[in-house]
Image (cartoon, rainbow, N blue to C red):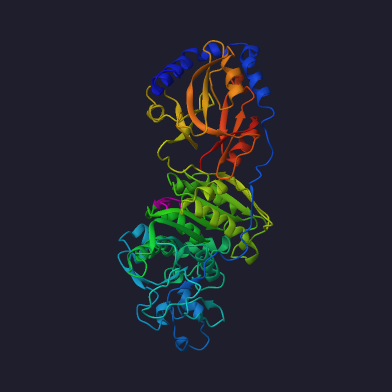
Amino acid sequence: MSDAPGLAAFRAHRRLRSLRRRVRCLGSSARRAGLALLALAWASAASGADPLATVPALTGPGPYPVACSDVTQDFSRLLPGETAEVYWEGQPRDDGTPRYLTDLLVTSGGAYTQPVAVPDDRELYGPYRGGSYALSQLVCYPTRADNPRPDYVLPDGRRVPRMQRAGEAPVFADGVERWPVIAFSHGLGGSPLGSGYLDFIVQFASYGYVVVAPFHGDPRFAKVKLEGLVDVILSLVEFPKFIAMQAVRPLGLVATLDLAVAHPHWRDRVDAGRIGGFGASLGGEAMMLAGGAALTTTVGQSSKRVLIEPRLKAAVGYVPYFGQPILPAFGRDQRGVDGVVLPFLAIGGGADLVAPLSEIEDAMVRLGSTRQLVVLDGTEHGLDPKDAPDIFTWSITFLDGQVKGDPVARAAYARMATVEGGGGDRSVYDYSAPSAPAGTERTVIEYRNASLDHYFLTAEPDEAAMLDAGVVVPGWTRTGMAFKASLRGTGQGLPACRFFGTPGVGPSSHFYTVDVPECAKVRADPFWTFEELAFAVEPAGVGVCAEGRVPVTRLYNNGKNNQANHRYLTSRSETTKMTDEGWMVEGPVFCALP
């Protein structure tokens, strides 16, 4: 538009409203005359699969050797028939006598054990409200190859690598002043030293993260299993304790992060502004709760927020337990996830009956930011070694982009659909929100008018604010989709021509293109009126974007309801949804900033 963006939008949409009835009455030939040109011009732009959608698998440890914190234990304290695992997991004896890692630790206060206060909230914490409990932690981190500390051998022969002993400070790898952090939450009844979990913690640390992992000790709060529908029903017998067990987990994660950013061993070497999370099974639920989701607190499926941890920038849930259909984790229909903006990657098992995909998907579609559901075909509940390459490739790419702030990783994740040579992984639901704009960058926001069933883009903050207010131009709401471009005139990318259907003859719709010949053709078409150069973005070339950029695909509604409209999407699943509704894919047209 040649006018100021807000005023111009007002005028265009005022024409849209006043002419709506007249436009709908136009003959289809007049409405489609300008559209035929667009279909022809972009018929050759449609391309096949993104060549960067398949990513090579991460099959081994990362570039850093790993060391871990002190968990020295006196295994002679084990009674006949006992194993160390029951202490790590917090399993009480048959007579109710409590057991926890602290009973085995050689050094009092070892494993960074600290008290965690429980708020005085009966609804969430039941019989444990107003009290406190002990929480121990394992910390693993990148170290130097010449770190001379010996491994610590566990009773089953597994090893805690280059373990610190009592009072020793960590020995970090050279070359990095402050390291990003991963809060690691194990599954129900597990522990950081449990089989599989320790390997995962060490692997994450080898990719350049300080991994902090609490020993949740779930059985100290409720003796439950969640291995099927019957177990869920049995959990109702002691429902207040079951709810409390889930609610204290995010409390423990917050306490663990507090320790990581405040303890003298870590505070000067971790980056409090770059914290992510990884949770397995019930640990995945704990991550969502830490992001602000509301936990189911009644059999009637009421829900209540536990907390929100603003330091958590993104989280991964592996086979995340989001409840069962009869008892969702986040309230009725997973409504407790509404309003949560924590970027979240869910990796579900295609054959998982404990954490069913239906409940995961119901929660994921409610998230308000970056969200993706990846399914591992044939995978049941638990940590399966065969899935490790898929899990780590998805998780590291995601966390490197969202937590480390690596723009190339962020773009790679946005384009990922599967891992090469993996175990049958597939992305079934995806959206990668752009990072916050800086300098001359701008977020291009998508809106939808439900009554018109039309979509609209704007990169102008004033215009977006006007549409959000819904007073001057009512009826437009954000879809939650966006991509990132640059200001026009900055020399970054090509300017996008913005057109609006000529009032009285053209469609009541906007159209955008950075293709110079197409812009000239549409500008000469009497059915379209040129408004302005809206934003700048790189062209997709022959349907392909370079590494470090995110393809934006244009879709056309095939003249639905005798009104042309286009969408510009970075989401594969949303594109599939629109094609199922009869929209036509015209191909990648922009290459957006990640």
Q: Quadrant of the N terminus?
A: top left
Q: Is residue 154 left or right of residue 471?
A: right
Which contiguous range is marked in magenta? Answer: 291-304
Closer to the camera in the image, 221 or 73: 73
Closer to the camera in the image, 413 or 208: 208
Q: Is residue 202 visible?
A: yes
Answer above or below: position of 11 versus 307.
Answer: above
Answer above or below: position of 538 versus 99.
Answer: above
Answer above or below: position of 294 versus 67.
Answer: above
Answer above or below: position of 432 versus 261.
Answer: above
Chief secondary structure of the magenta span?
Answer: loop
The image quadrant of residue 29 is top right
The image quadrant of residue 541 is top right
Which residue is pictured at 56% across the width and 30% down the height? 567
Q: Is residue 93 left or right of residue 379?
A: left
Magenta stretch: residue 301 in it? yes
Number of callouts in the render?
Answer: 0
Q: Position of residue 579 (x, y in %)?
A: 65, 33
Q: Position of residue 9 (x, y in %)?
A: 43, 21
Q: Position of residue 234 (x, y in %)?
A: 52, 64
Magenta stretch: residue 279 in it? no
Q: Position of residue 325 (x, y in %)?
A: 55, 52
Q: Is residue 298 visible?
A: no
Which residue is pictured at 43% across the width and 82% down the height? 104
The image quadrant of residue 210 is bottom left
